[in-house]
């Protein structure tokens, strides 16, 4: 499965990164970060109406290169000006052509909360996220057994980082709830065959307690998609490709929001 290939590549990168900056030093740098630890990511998603998490995504395993031109700072600023509640930055290098530098530069330039979108396998990456200026991280149930899921959740929480816990099915939702997640995302992309179905979010929404924020991720292309998800009780949508392929991201976000945004 693609997740096995991605996590193998990520694990290799982590070992290389630890050679450059050892874990104890990364942890010390994270503890030194002065920004407030007050969870701006989840506060931004709690606003009334549906919220938009707009993704800075250069490439993906399912689509290959999405953005040949990649002025990531302009893209992030455009998302902010368009009223994005949060900005998702892919930092995985081998399959998404992401970079920690993109996140670092973007987080320093915008006031909108930024989430590190990556395949977190090691606490080291959580400290890195804090050092780079992220407000949130993604934890994917499918690649973490319970013990690490809970431990990573608590490390992030203690650093003031919100956690978007990603699930694909009912069992993973139960695990996300048990680990204490306040923000749960359902990925509509089937990672075995890359098909997307928004029905996955709609079907799983009732399994998530009302006090948790619910994010629908992947495959959201039209205002009708957004409206259908909102009708099914979704609090926020995470959109990458549709926005990345749009030459006028502000206009696209406005359209996706049914004319109510920007
Ligand atoms: O996007 C992929 O091909 C992919 C493949 C394997 C694991 C994760 C993948 N995507 C990560 C994401 O969660 C999406 O980038 C995000 O939800 C936005 O999706 P989209 O709007 O469909 O670009």
Image (spheres, grey):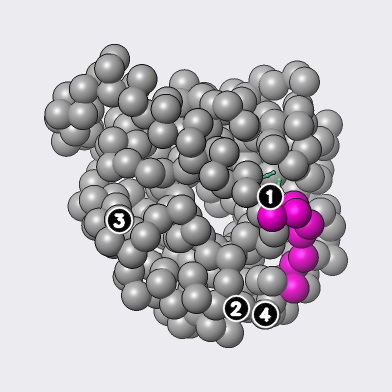
Q: Which mark is residue 205?
A: 2
Find the distance from the CA under tag 2 to the CA under tag 4.
Answer: 6 Å
State whether residue 164 appears in this view: no
In the figure, residue 243 lies in which quadrant? top right
Point out the residue furthest to the top here: 20
Main secondary structure found in the magenta portion: loop
Q: Are marks 2 and 4 in contact (CB under 8 Å)?
A: yes
N-terminal of the two: label 2 or label 1?
Answer: 2
The magenta segment is: 192-199
| Left or right: 26, with 4 as reference point | left
| Residue that carries the numbered disc 1 in the rendered image | 239
The first of marks 2 and 3 along the sequence is 3
The residue mark sitting in front, 4 or 1, is: 4
How crowded is the residue under tag 2: few (<14 C-alpha within 10 Å), some, or many (20+)?
many
Left or right of 180: which side holds 92?
right
Residue 148: numbered disc: 3
Q: Are marks 2 and 1 in contact (CB under 8 Å)?
A: no
Binning the other alpha carbons within 10 Å of mark 4 as few (below 14), some (14 to 19) or many (20 upward) gives few
């Amino acid at each position: 499965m693609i997740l096995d290939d991605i996590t193998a590549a990520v694990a290799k990168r982590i070992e290389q990164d630890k050679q450059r900056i050892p874990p104890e030093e990364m942890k010390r740098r994270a503890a030194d970060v002065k920004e407030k630890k007050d969870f701006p990511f989840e506060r931004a998603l709690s606003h009334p109406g549906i919220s938009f998490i707009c993704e800075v995504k250069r490439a993906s395993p399912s689509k290959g290169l999405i953005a040949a031109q990649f002025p990531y700072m302009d893209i992030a600023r455009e998302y902010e000006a368009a009223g994005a509640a949060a900005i998702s930055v892919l930092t995985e290098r081998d399959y998404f052509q992401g970079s920690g530098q993109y996140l670092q530069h973007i987080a320093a330039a915008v006031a909108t909360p930024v989430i590190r979108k990556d395949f977190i396998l090691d606490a080291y990456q959580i400290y890195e996220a804090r050092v780079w200026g992220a407000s949130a991280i993604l934890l994917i149930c499918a690649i973490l057994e319970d013990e690490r899921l809970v431990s990573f959740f608590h490390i992030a929480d203690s650093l003031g980082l919100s956690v978007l816990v990603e699930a694909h099915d009912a069992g993973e939702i139960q695990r996300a709830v048990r680990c204490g997640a306040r923000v749960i995302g359902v990925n509509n992309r089937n990672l075995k065959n890359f098909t997307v179905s928004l029905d996955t979010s709609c079907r799983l929404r009732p399994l998530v307690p009302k006090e948790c924020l619910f994010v629908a991720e992947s495959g959201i292309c039209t205002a009708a998609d957004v409206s259908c998800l909102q009708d099914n009780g979704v609090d926020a949508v995470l959109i990458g490709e549709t926005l990345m392929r749009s030459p006028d991201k502000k206009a696209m976000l406005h359209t996706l929001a049914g004319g109510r945004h920007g």
